[in-house]
Amino acid sequence: MAMWNPWRGCKKCSDGCLHCYIHKGDAKRGVNTNDIAKTKDFYKPIDKLKNGNYKMKPGLVYLGFSTDFLIEEADEWRKECWSMIRERQDCTFLFLTKRIERFMDCIPEDWGDGYDNVVVCCTIENQKNADKKLSVFATLPIKHKCITVQPLLEKVDMEKYMDDIELVVVGGESDYNARPLDYDWVLDIREQCIKKDVQFEFRQCGTHFIKDGKRYKLQTKDLCKQAKLADIDYLPVGRNNEHKTN
């Protein structure tokens, strides 16, 4: 697994962005997250060793996890990224986006019905954005589609949008002032996934977690561990767990 951030910086654009970990981390370092800038790793996928081999090994590549790959400020750079993605057919590039409505304006000319080596993960957090974004996502020509429901802020009905979805990831919000995550909401989405035979993964609890009507406050270091202990992930029979989000 590799990480490729061709640019950094992002702008809050959705209800789930309130306590964004990228903005919090940048604030501690005195960095303005709203400044979108290319990084020194821009050409990382095609950098080569002296022997001519690629420095970045084949396999899954997390793309743009310190930004949004479809953000407007990066429009002039994205075409070159698509070229590198096309060159590295030995890698699978996975990116999350809160800007799925921009997708058709951001794809390369030869996209067709999608690149085999690209996984697109649409991020939502509540019913309003599920209806708004997933209705668009369902119409797009993408070969590998995932949905990330992080942070899950309320009960969400998304079963009608799950056709052709390979994976749904659910998680809570991590912050002192985090909005609560009710375990019943998680289980409800799990049942929707089982009905549609879609892979489901409970990634992390929220800092403020509700189970059986009781409220808990969890430490950040325990959020993923507690979700794993719940042991509710669902993997359809015969399906390989090959596309994992962070």
Image: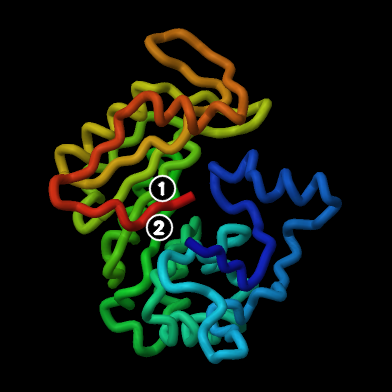
116 relative to 225 in the view: left or right = left
Return the mark for residue 148. Answer: 1
Return the mark for residue 48. Answer: none
Residue at point 58%, 53% (across, down): 13
For disc 2, the neighbor class at 10 Å (few under 14, some 14 to 19, many from 20) is many
Image colouring: rainbow
Residue 107 position in % (x across, y down): 42, 79
Residue 117 position in % (x across, y down): 35, 73
Task: Inspect the image, locate mark 1, and give the three-letter code of the amino acid beneath it.
Answer: Thr
The answer to whether 200 is drawn above or below residue 67 in the figure is: above
Residue 141 position in % (x across, y down): 28, 72
Is residue 38 visible to us here? no
Task: Find disc 2 in the rendering and name its residue.
Answer: 121
Task: Inspect the image, locate mark 2, and give the three-letter code of the amino acid beneath it.
Answer: Cys
Residue at point 68%, 26% (across, down): 176
61 relative to 19 in the view: left or right = left
Residue at point 72%, 71% (across, down): 37
Is residue 199 visible to us here? yes
For disc 1, the neighbor class at 10 Å (few under 14, some 14 to 19, many from 20) is many
